[in-house]
Image (cartoon, grey):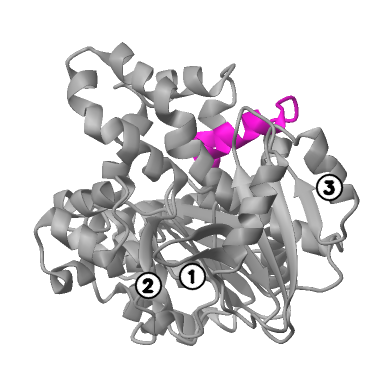
């Protein structure tokens, strides 16, 4: 299996920071399983570097562990057997014993140090200001608890604010890179794998060896021994205090309730009571608020819908969470049957829309149209929904798109329906130039292919 796909930009940034004159402080963070530790540990190979993994233990235990790591790194016998109650002494020992080449120190799961001692960011700030910033070293602070990393290292209120020389928020890998993980698989299979693994390297690694998506789900998600069986609980339990309440909100959205009023009604809560849950889930990159793409003031729009951004969580809350009682009682085959029956129409076809939206940017870079758009998204009103609308805010060109994850070929009737639906979009209606794109995972009928060949405003893609 190939590693470090789609991490070239982050790797280059780290190398640039390493090569710059003087010291640098980089914050590397993102959701769990996204590959932060692997990126950091691969980056420091063959370099003068110390890697330290913080734990959820008390500060004393972490400081003792760091002391041992420093003593081993510096081969410092006296330090190994000394009692040190000061972080600054440990860092100064590191600097004194360091070689002439730049020293890298990686503190992984940094947020646990601030959790055990809320004043630790202040302690590190003082050490940085008095010793490290002029010492020709690179300090990398890694963390998985997004809310804690932001409050301890990135926010304006953090003592470390203004000290960092850069930050990397590591994201999931986009669908366009999946063929590099699975070069032997066809596009339809890649879509299936992406719809469940959602670009998380650790999940991709698990699914890699399986022959198809259903055997991968059976082995890696439905098995009570697999870590993915309880993954959402693991992801949320350190980030939020009321895991059950957040589970209820996520489950409601996954079930198809996207309007604030519908979510609140389903949970028998006031809309104002939902605010903190939705804000936290958006901060964690789990939920997003979406408005029709042509809305001029998205923040003020009353048409906002809440959707799950994470493909795996969406899958888990659709198919696993509602059926836990069956799995726990040994009826795994019943759940697998439900998944086989509903996975395509109930999940993959929805994810396919986001894949098509991603491909719009690729097609634009390939000059499929004579203009360059700057916005892509879904559009809807009370009566009509269009999968993709892309347009140039400064110009008058607009593209309407439909995505069909069908076993059949897409016919000319879909193009005609799309042309009719486009009439509902008011954006520059009297002076715009309209284009159309149809995505069909299983291809197109002969009459549609012929129609597209004779028109310069129609594009077909898979």
**Neighbour class for label 1 at 10 Å: few (<14), some, many (≥20)?**
many
The residue stretch that appears in magenta: 182-204
Disc 3 marks which residue?
Answer: 451
Q: Nearer the viewer, residue 308 or 216?
A: 308
Q: Is residue 398 left or right of residue 50?
A: right
Magenta span contains residue 200: yes
Distance in Å between CA atoms under marks 1 and 2: 7 Å
- Residue shown at 48% from the left, 20% from the top: 214
- Residue at 72%, 43% in the rendered image: 412
Quadrant housing the N terminus: top right
In the rendered image, which residue does mark 2 sit on? 303
Q: Which residue is mark 1?
A: 292
Q: Which quarter of the rendered picture does the C terminus lie within?
A: top right
x then y, percent, for residue 319 = 33, 32
Say whether disc 1 or disc 2 marks the residue closer to the N-terminus: 1
Is the C-beta separation of discs 1 and 2 under 8 Å? yes
Mark 2 is surrounded, within 10 Å at the Cα level, by few (under 14), some (14 to 19) or many (20 or more) other residues, namely some
Disc 1 to disc 3, C-alpha distance: 29 Å
Of 79 and 149, nearer the camera is 149
Q: Position of residue 406 (x, y in %)?
A: 60, 33
Q: Is residue 22 magenta?
A: no
């Amino acid at each position: 299996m190939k590693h470090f796909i789609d991490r070239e930009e982050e790797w280059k940034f780290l190398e640039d920071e390493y090569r710059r004159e003087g010291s640098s402080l980089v914050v590397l963070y993102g959701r769990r399983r996204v590959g932060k530790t692997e990126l950091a540990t691969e980056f420091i190979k063959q370099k003068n570097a110390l890697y330290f993994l913080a734990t959820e233990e008390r500060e004393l235990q972490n400081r003792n562990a760091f002391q041992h790591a420093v003593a081993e790194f510096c081969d410092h016998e006296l330090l190994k057997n000394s009692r040190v109650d000061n972080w600054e002494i440990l860092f100064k020992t590191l600097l004194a014993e360091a070689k002439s080449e730049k020293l890298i120190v990686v503190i992984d799961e940094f947020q646990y140090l601030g959790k055990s001692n809320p004043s630790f960011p202040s302690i590190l700030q003082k050490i940085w200001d008095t010793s490290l910033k002029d010492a020709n070293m690179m300090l990398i602070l890694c963390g998985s608890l997004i809310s804690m990393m932001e409050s301890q290292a990135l926010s304006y209120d953090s003592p470390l604010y203004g000290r960092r020389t850069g930050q990397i928020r590591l994201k999931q890998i986009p669908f366009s890179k999946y063929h590099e993980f699975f070069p032997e698989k066809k596009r339809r299979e890649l879509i299936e794998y992406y719809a469940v693994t959602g670009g998380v390297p650790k999940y991709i690694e698990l699914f890699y060896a399986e022959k198809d998506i259903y055997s991968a789900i059976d082995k890696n998600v439905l098995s009570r021994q697999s870590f993915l069986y309880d993954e959402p609980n693991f992801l949320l339990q350190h980030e939020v205090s009321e895991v059950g309440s957040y589970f209820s909100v996520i489950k409601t959205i996954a079930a198809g309730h996207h309007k604030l009023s519908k979510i609140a009604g389903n949970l028998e809560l006031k809309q104002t009571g939902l605010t903190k849950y939705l804000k936290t889930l958006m901060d964690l990159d789990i939920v997003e608020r979406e408005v029709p793409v042509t809305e001029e003031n998205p923040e003020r729009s009353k048409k906002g819908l809440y959707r799950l951004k994470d493909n795996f969580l969406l899958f888990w809350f659709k198919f696993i969470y509602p059926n836990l009682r069956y799995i726990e009682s040994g009826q795994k085959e019943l759940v697998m049957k439900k998944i086989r029956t509903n996975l395509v129409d109930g999940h993959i076809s929805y994810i396919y829309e986001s894949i098509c939206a991603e491909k719009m940017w690729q097609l634009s870079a390939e000059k499929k149209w004579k203009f360059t758009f700057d916005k892509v998204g879904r559009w809807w009103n009370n009566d009509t929904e269009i999968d993709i609308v892309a347009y140039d805010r400064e110009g008058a060109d607009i593209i309407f798109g439909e995505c069909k994850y069908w076993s059949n070929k897409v016919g000319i009737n879909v193009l005609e329906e799309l042309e009719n639906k486009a009439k509902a979009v008011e954006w520059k209606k009297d002076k715009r130039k309209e284009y159309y794109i149809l995505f069909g995972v299983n291809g197109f009928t002969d009459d549609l292919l012929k129609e597209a060949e004779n028109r310069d405003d129609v594009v077909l893609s898979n």
